[in-house]
Image: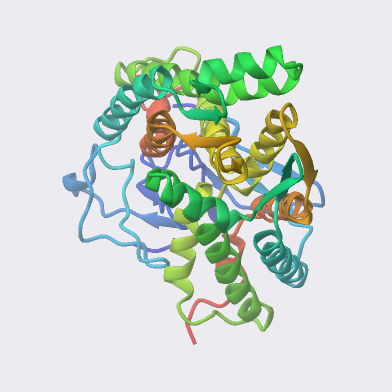
């Protein structure tokens, strides 16, 4: 059993390829099933780290600031993400509260913190303590962050409420929109490059 | 054999987690089929190596059927109650879409309809079709089936849209007796349906599409 870094196996159909360096803008697709095998990475470790730090700051803002305010006959009502989660818990929809807390708060936060930690050490050309288990964790965390779905949900909620109330979009929704953009950028990044970029032995 | 060698033919295994290409131990029948080799772990990330996702057919069917069973109450039961001074209005997923359409936002009505009805139905139909055709070893429309699987994986989590809409409206519309929104059990069933369909599409192994009798394209 000897690992070989020169080969590449398509995850979707098991076809074996020889790995080769890609030029800017190139994408390698599987000739059998069309799955994207590899793409040229324009963003280096430093750029990625900067993106993650920005996303973390925006994430704090998106969670602290109210998202929307509703007005009815001079009464006002606003909520933040955590306000929403706590309300759902109190309204006997604990399942929804847990789902929202996980996919909109804990998973995205964990993803950004772990990535930041790995990239911080990657910048110095080293593997962070706990590198392998953290990389495995990131793999499983993959599709379970839903901030972008929440932004669309907020939009639908605003439109629905607009028929009955005065609606004011608060800074939180803009922070969320910005966060979605940032997440989209680093969601497209193949994290597996970190395995190649840092030396095999752990510190 | 076509010009594109597959890992099994070359005695290789790609780690499902980190992608490392490993050589499998020849002649070890425990690795064949759906089996998991307990002794062999990826030397790089430590995950258990397997040729195919373990028990892919059984797990995917089980999760898919469970998701479908929960999808029935998710649609039949109301997901949200709007209470004001003089009336109480319970909305199901469909009546919410109709309301958006009637109240002058047909574009958003289409988006919600797509996320709450089309996407889950597409997942049920596509995954069942993929499971049946791959189970028979069919070589019909393989590239298209591979593409369909990627589509299902990509759009899956957008179904959570309606759950977040209800949650946000519940937290916002709290004007004591004048106007209130409360979540109803339908939304819980719907949230669980989405989670189960996501787990189902994750446990399906797209390599099975290409594993039929005739591996040539």
Q: Is residue A84 above or below residue B58?
A: below
Identity of the residue furthest to the bottom in this view: A203
Q: Residue at x 61, y 81 (%)?
A: A121
Q: Quadrant of residue B174?
A: top right
In this rendered view, identify the residue nearer to me: B215 or A87: A87
Q: Quadrant of residue B108?
A: top right
Residue B155 percent coordinates (x, y): 57, 32
Residue B170 percent coordinates (x, y): 55, 41
Q: Is residue B145 above or below residue B201?
A: above
Q: Residue at x 37, y 67 (%)?
A: B43
Q: Which colour style is shown?
A: rainbow
The answer to whether residue A144 of the structure is visible from this angle is: yes
Residue A200 percent coordinates (x, y): 50, 76
Residue B61 percent coordinates (x, y): 29, 27
Image quarter of the N terminus of chain A: bottom left
In this rendered view, identify the residue nearer to me: B155 or B66: B66
Q: Residue at x 45, y 39 (%)?
A: A14
Q: Residue at x 35, y 22 (%)?
A: B73
């Amino acid at each position: 059993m000897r690992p070989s870094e020169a080969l590449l196996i398509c995850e979707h159909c098991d076809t074996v390829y020889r790995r080769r360096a890609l030029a800017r803008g190139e994408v390698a697709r599987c000739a059998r099933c069309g799955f994207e095998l590899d793409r040229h990475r324009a963003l280096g470790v430093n750029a990625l780290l900067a993106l993650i730090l920005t996303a973390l700051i925006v994430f704090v803002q998106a969670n602290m600031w109210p998202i929307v305010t509703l007005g009815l006959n001079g009464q006002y009502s606003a909520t933040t993400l955590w306000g929403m989660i706590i309300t759902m818990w109190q309204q006997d929809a604990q399942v929804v509260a847990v789902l929202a807390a996980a996919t909109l708060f804990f998973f995205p936060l964990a993803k950004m913190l772990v990535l930041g930690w790995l990239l911080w050490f990657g910048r110095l050309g080293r593997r962070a303590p706990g590198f392998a288990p953290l990389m495995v964790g990131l793999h499983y965390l993959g599709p379970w962050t839903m901030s972008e779905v929440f932004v669309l949900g907020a939009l639908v909620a605003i439109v629905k409420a607009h028929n009955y109330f005065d609606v004011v979009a608060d800074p939180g929704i803009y922070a969320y929109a910005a966060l979605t953009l940032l997440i989209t950028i680093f969601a497209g990044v193949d994290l597996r490059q970190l395995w190649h970029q840092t030396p095999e032995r752990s510190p | 054999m076509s010009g594109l060698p597959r890992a099994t033919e070359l005695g290789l295994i790609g780690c499902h987690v980190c992608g490392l290409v490993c050589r499998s131990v020849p002649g070890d029948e425990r690795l064949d089929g759906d089996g998991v080799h307990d002794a062999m772990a990826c030397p790089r990330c430590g995950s258990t190596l397997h040729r195919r996702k373990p028990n892919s057919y059984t797990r995917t069917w089980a999760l898919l059927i469970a998701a479908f069973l929960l999808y029935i109450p998710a649609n039949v039961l109301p997901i949200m109650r709007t209470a004001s001074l003089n009336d109480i209005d319970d909305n199901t997923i469909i009546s919410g879409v109709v309301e958006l359409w009637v109240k002058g936002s047909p574009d958003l009505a289409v988006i919600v309809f797509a996320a709450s009805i089309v996407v889950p139905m597409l997942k049920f139909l596509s995954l069942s079709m993929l499971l049946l055709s791959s189970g028979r070893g069919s070589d019909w429309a393989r590239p298209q089936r591979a593409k369909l699987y990627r589509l299902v994986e990509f759009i899956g989590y957008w179904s959570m849209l309606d759950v977040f809409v209800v949650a946000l409206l519940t937290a916002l519309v709290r004007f004591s007796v004048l106007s209130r929104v409360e979540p109803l059990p339908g939304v819980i069933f719907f949230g669980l349906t989405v989670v189960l369909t996501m787990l189902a599409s994750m446990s399906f192994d797209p390599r099975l599409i290409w594993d039929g009798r005739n591996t040539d394209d």
